[in-house]
Image: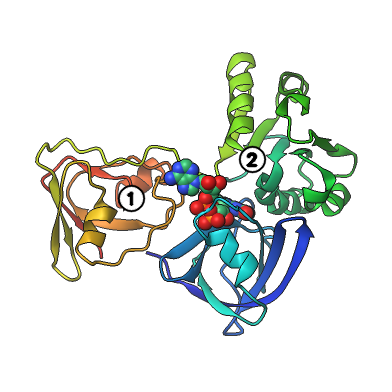
Amino acid sequence: MTTKQRVLVSAMRYEAKGILSVEMVSAQDEDLAQFSAGGHIDVFFRKGLVRQYSLINDPEEKNRYQFAVLLEREGRGGSAFVHKSLRVGDVIEVSQPRNNFKLNDDADSHVFVAGGIGITPFISMAHHCRRHARPMKLYYCARAPETTAFVEQLTEIFGENTEVHYDGGDPSKSIDLTQLVAKEKGSQLYCCGPRGLMDALSDVVYRHGGSLLTEDFNPAGSKTHTENSNDGGFTIELLRSGVSVDVVPGQTIIEALQAANIEVETSCEAGVCGTCVVDYVDGEPIHNDVVLMPDEQEKSVALCVAGCNSKKLVVDL
Ligand SMILES: Cc1cc2nc3c(=O)[nH]c(=O)nc-3n(C[C@H](O)[C@H](O)[C@H](O)COP(=O)(O)OP(=O)(O)OC[C@H]3O[C@@H](n4cnc5c(N)ncnc54)[C@H](O)[C@@H]3O)c2cc1C
């Protein structure tokens, strides 16, 4: 698990209807851990409420983090906490920055396709590309001007390589993805937004060729069950306390630990965010996550979706 950073909320402002940006500085007057373009942090709002937010400021800035949060009325409370409870002057904890959505350094040019709040990771990428004079273009799909954030700032960065498409909530009136893929042939494509947009673009890329990287903000509905080749379940042993807990078939490791009153940080519960990643020292985990690279899976495991091929998994907890 990573070291948390204590931060002070230094500014908050509405960027569009339902979208609030938050600026944070170190509560200890230190530099904050550096992030890379497209990176995010876990924000710990209160016990048990952790959410991920893409950082939207320039990755070269060491004195602050900035992110923007869309109010999800149907959500489980993370975005509502930001909109209704978080205030300037509050001190909270955030994780070290992580990045599951990196720029492809080998690409000659970068084409960003954003839908709604999925614009956020592209803002730090844009700062980075501008600083390093890397060619880039933005396609920004949204419902209506009043709910669309950062258009002015992004137009200033992307200049004439900015295309904003308003569809009034009807995706059939949005951008023609087949044309987009044909036009941007040879560029690295990136997409973040509603799953419908990401699936549609990935479908076109699959049929017409190209390279696409995506980030899913809402992993709910992804695979969340624990695969387990041991019909009788397995045991998870916590190295530091020596405690062992049985994980029964169909149960996730997180559920088993929580049932034994063992607190463990978790958030997406779909192997996407990385909050519950820990090192393991013995056993043969089945990695069902999409957050760890193959070399990282040799020493770490995302507890929320992992199964186990051995009878015992010993983790550094
Ligand atoms: C890497 C990363 C970066 C992110 N960056 C941003 C960002 O910059 N800005 C931003 O606003 N958000 C971002 N998010 C999303 C953010 O972490 C929160 O998920 C978001 O703020 C909503 O939190 P919530 O608790 O209000 O809603 P959640 O409970 O997380 O719900 C979000 C949506 O999922 C649906 N949902 C919840 N549970 C289920 C379920 N079991 N089955 C089906 N549907 C379900 C809800 O109806 C809701 O529409 C990011 C997520 C990730 C993983």
The residue lying toward the viewer, choosing from 258 and 290, is 258
Quadrant position of residue 134: top right
The location of residue 20, given as percent across then percent down, is: 71, 62
The residue lying at 70 percent from left, 40 percent from top is: 114
| Vertical arrangement, residue 234 with respect to residue 277, above or below | above
Residue type indicated by callout 1 = Cys
User: Looking at the image, do the residues carrying marks 2 and 1 touch, with CB atoms under 8 Å apart?
Assistant: no
The residue lying toward the viewer, choosing from 168 and 36, is 168
Q: Is residue 138 left or right of residue 229?
A: right
The location of residue 224, given as percent across then percent down, is: 35, 41
Q: Secondary structure at mark 2?
A: loop
| Vertical arrangement, residue 190 with respect to residue 66, above or below | above
Image quarter in which the C terminus is found: bottom left
Q: Is residue 234 left or right of residue 300?
A: left
Residue type indicated by callout 2 = Gly
The residue where tag 1 is placed is 304
